[in-house]
Amino acid sequence: MTAPRRFTELAAAATAALFLLSWGLLHTGWYDDGEIVDTPVYARYGDAIENGEVPYRDFRPEYPPGALPAFVVPALLSDDDEEDFRDAFEWLMAAFGVATVLLAAVTLRGVGATRARTVGALGLVGAFPLLLGSVMLTRFDLYPTALLVGALAALVHERDRLGLGVLGAAVAVKLFPAVVVPVALAYTWRRRGRREALVCLAICAGVVALTFLPFLVVAPEELARSIGHQLSRPLQIESLGSGLFLAAHHLTGLDVEVRSGHGSQNLHAAGTAIAALFFSLVQIGVLVWIWLRRPAAKEELLRWSAAALVAFVALGKVLSPQFLIWLAPTVPLVGGLRGLRASALLAVALVLTQLWFPSRYWDLARDLDPFPSTLVVLRDVVLVAVLVVLVRERSGGSARSP
C-alpha cells in the first residue's frame, strides 16, 4: 500500500535531520583524520572569479561551466581565508545534501512507494555520509547529484520537460548525468511519442548549450581542452582495471608503477593502456545495452537510470571515491527485492571505500600496500555485483522492459 503523503513528508523531514547529523559526525573521531581535500583548488577558482578573472580564458578549471557556482558562492561568502572558504563550501554542500534527501522522498512518492520502502530507501540516503566518510565534505558532487535526483523526481511525476531540463543542468555541472539522458528520453518516447521526446531532447541540449555558450565564445580552445583533459585520463589506480593489475602484482610479482597526472594517481605497467581502452569499450557497450532497454514504467526508469550510473562508475578507467556519491541516492530508489539487494551491496561498497580512503590512500598510491590494494579490488568487485543485480532479469523474464 502506498505510504500516505503525510507519512512521506515526516519521513523526509526525519531523514534530512539524519543527514545533517551524519554530516556533523564526519567532523569527529576517525572521520576527521588524514583528510585528502579538493577545497584549496576550489578556493583558487572561486577567488579568481571574485577578482574578475574569466574562467577558461584567464585560468582553466578542470570542470564544466555549470560547476562554477560551487566555487564562486563560497568565495563570496567567505574572507580570503582557506578555512572560511571550506566552512562556506561545506554548508553549501550540506544544503545540496538535504535537497537530495527531499527530492528522493518526492521521487518515492511519485512511484507510490510503501511505508517500508520509503523508510528503507531514505534511511540509506540519510546515513550514507557515515558509510562513505569525509570525502563527502570536500567534493562538490552533491551539487550535480541533487540535480540528477530532482530530474528523476520530475520525470516520475510526469513532468518530462522539466525533468530533462534539470538533467541538462546536471550534465552542465559534471558530465556523468549524461548517461541517464538516453534512459530518460526513451522513457518519454515510449509514453508520449517521438515528438515529445525530441522536444525534451532539445530542452536538455539547450540548457547545456546555454551554460557552455558564454565560455565557448570567449575561450573555445581552453574550454575544449578542459573537457578533453577529463576524457583522456589514463588508468586510475582505484579503477577495476587497475585492481586486476594490483592483484597480479601481489600474486605474481607483475611489475607496476604509479604515476601522478590528470589530478590523480594512475597505474602504469605493460598492458595498462590496452586495459584502459578495453574497459572504456566495455563501459560503452554496457551503457548502450542499458539505453536500449527503453523503459516505459516509472519503476523501470529508476532501475535503468541507476544501472547506467553504476555501469559508468564500475566499468570506467577512472573511479574516484566521490563517484559513489552519485550512486548513494539513486540505487536505493530502485524498488522490490532487486532494489534491496543492490542497496545492501552498495552499502558494502561505501564501507569498503572508507576503510582505505583517505586513511590508507597513500599506502596504496606510494607503496602499493597489499591491504588497501585488496580493499580496492573488493570494492570494485562489489560495484560490479551491484550492476549485475540491477540488470539481471528474473528467471523467465523478458530482457526488454514492458
Image: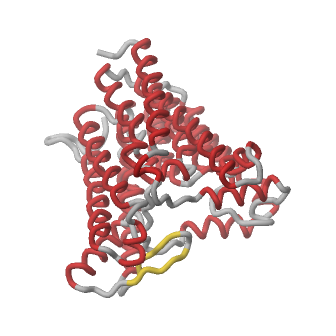
Q: Residue 164 sits in which quadrant?
A: top right
At horizontal 78% and vertical 59% (from top left) the residue drawn is: 48
The structure residue drawn at horizontal position 55% and vertical position 59%, both measured from the top left corner, is 37
Instruction: Give the residue at the far left of this rendering.
Output: 395
Q: Quadrant of the C terminus?
A: top left
Please state the horizontal and vertical placement of residue 195, each as a whole percent of the image.
56, 36
Q: Looking at the picture, tell me which residue is in the foreground, 109 or 122.
A: 122
23 on left or right of 86: left
Q: How many marks?
A: 0
Q: Report x, y in % for residue 240.
A: 33, 66
Against 95, is 354 above or below?
below
**Image-quadrant location for residue 283:** bottom left
Question: What residue appears at the point 14 percent right and 42 percent down from the top-left corner?
Answer: 395
- For the N terminus, the image quarter is top left
Judge by depth and name the residue closer to the eye, 284 or 234.
234
Relative to residue 255, is residue 184 depicted above or below? above
Q: Is residue 292 visible?
A: no
Indicate left or right for 8 with 93 as reference.
Answer: left
* Residue 147: % across, % down: 56, 39
Picture coordinates of residue 108 (x, y %)? 40, 26
The residue drawn where x is 58% and y is 59% is 38
Furthest residue toward right: 52
- Can residue 150 be seen here? The reply is yes
